[in-house]
């Protein structure tokens, strides 16, 4: 597990060495384990990401979610699972949470209470980082709220990820499919304002999800116009404002990475992107593994007894849920290894 200064050092190393960490949305132990299996194979760090809806799913859709109780409990339970098993994979794992809108701040408050309790007992927070997505609010309000939360996070070594502009499309309850296209592109002045304000927080650590045409989901060619040059321009603007020799003073993250071209990904990494979110592609990969398993053993999955080998042959070993789920884990892990190649995140631990 990587938290606090170790996390900042890891992200600084990624920026300096020119790689980005896969940030993967998960929905249970199967997708969590696929993430860590992939990281072990490609030899690099992984960011395991919980969403509000993902947390609720882990707790169980029938669980009482009044006041986000199930969403909080599921995320906490998932984080503790990661902490228990991560050491068995031997790779750096970052525990993160995804988009938290203004209306969802009570969920974040619950997670912070869990972090503070864990810190009091173990000397480090339960999670490594959290994301606040207040991009629907005016810039000043967005950053003011982020600054307030960062002050709380900094006391226990949690990194804040914040969003400027809007990531289009729809993902896990966040629907920006009809947003005005102009809001998909962040301006350098906005990035500088956020950098200046958040840098005032003692011991504060943060990353920026600046929009450059990003869209959640996968779409036909021509429907998404990524402009990662916005990140390069923002770095240049901040560098000039600071009068620094650092060409990449801001750590950027890339949202809506599924379906992006290798060229756009590589160009974004050169602008200081240190993490790319992946969800749609890994969802498909997991399902594809389950689908192929069913197709391969279809005739063994039509009843408890009876298959092509004989009318009285048992099928238990085929319909055991672990079999199809394992197939999903394997294809998801394989897709993440492909992503790691695109992100230059292969064999970076030496």
Image (spheres, rainbow, N blue to C red):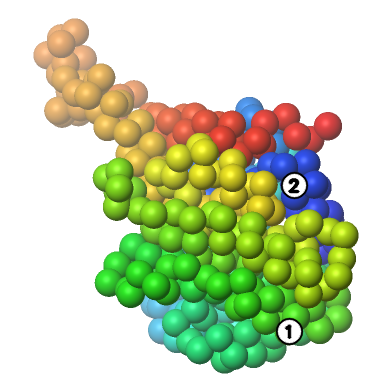
Closer to us: 106 or 103: 103
Asked if residue 113 can be seen in this view, the reply is no
Provide the residue designation for mark 2: 14
In the rendered image, the quadrant that contains the C terminus is top right
In screen coordinates, is 188 left or right of 28? right
Provide the residue designation for mark 1: 197
Give the vertical position of 220 relative to 121 (above or below): above
Closer to us: 211 or 162: 211
Is the residue under label 1 in contact with that under label 2 (CB below 8 Å)?
no
Residue at point 79%, 35% (across, down):
349
Residue at point 72%, 29% (across, down):
347
Q: Earlier in the sequence, mark 2 or mark 1?
A: 2
Give the vertical position of 200 relative to 289 (above or below): below
| Residue 296 position within the rendered picture, expressed as x and y whole percent measured from the top left | 25, 19
| Residue 125 position within the rendered picture, expressed as x and y whole percent measured from the top left | 75, 68
In screen coordinates, is 154 left or right of 245? left
Query: What secondary structure is found at the residue carrying circle 1?
Result: helix
Give the farthest residue toward the left. Answer: 311
């Amino acid at each position: 597990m990587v938290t606090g200064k170790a996390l900042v050092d890891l992200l600084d190393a990624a920026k300096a060495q020119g790689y980005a960490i896969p940030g993967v949305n998960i929905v249970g132990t199967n997708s969590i384990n696929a993430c860590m299996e992939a990281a072990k194979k490609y030899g690099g760090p992984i960011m395991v990401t919980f969403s509000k809806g993902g947390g609720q799913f882990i707790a169980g859709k029938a669980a009482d979610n009044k006041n986000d109780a199930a969403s909080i409990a599921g995320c906490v339970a998932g984080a503790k699972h990661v902490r228990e098993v991560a050491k068995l994979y031997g790779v750096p794992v970052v525990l993160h949470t995804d988009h938290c809108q203004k209306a969802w701040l009570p969920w974040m408050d619950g997670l912070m209470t869990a972090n503070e309790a864990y810190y009091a007992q173990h000397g480090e927070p339960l999670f490594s980082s959290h994301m606040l997505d207040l991009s629907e609010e005016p810039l000043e309000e967005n950053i003011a709220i982020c600054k307030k939360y960062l002050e709380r996070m900094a006391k226990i070594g949690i990194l804040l990820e914040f969003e400027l502009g809007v990531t289009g499309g729809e993902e896990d309850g966040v629907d920006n499919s009809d947003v005005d296209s102009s809001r998909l592109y962040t301006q350098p002045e906005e990035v500088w304002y956020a950098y200046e304000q958040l840098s005032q927080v003692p011991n504060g650590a943060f990353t920026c999800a600046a929009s450059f045409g990003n869209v959640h989901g996968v779409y036909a060619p021509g429907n998404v116009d990524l402009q990662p040059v916005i990140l390069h321009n923002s770095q240049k603007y901040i560098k000039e404002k600071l009068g620094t020799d650092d060409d990449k003073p801001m750590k950027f993250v890339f949202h809506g990475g599924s379906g992006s071209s290798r060229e756009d990904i590589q160009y974004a990494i050169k602008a200081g992107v240190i993490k790319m979110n992946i969800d749609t592609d890994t969802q498909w990969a997991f399902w594809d593994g389950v689908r192929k398993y069913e197709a391969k053993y279809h005739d063994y999955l039509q009843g408890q007894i009876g298959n092509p080998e004989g009318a009285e042959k048992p099928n238990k070993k085929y319909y055991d849920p672990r079999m199809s789920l394992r197939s999903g884990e394997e294809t998801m892990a394989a897709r993440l290894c492909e992503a790691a190649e695109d992100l230059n995140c292969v064999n970076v631990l030496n």
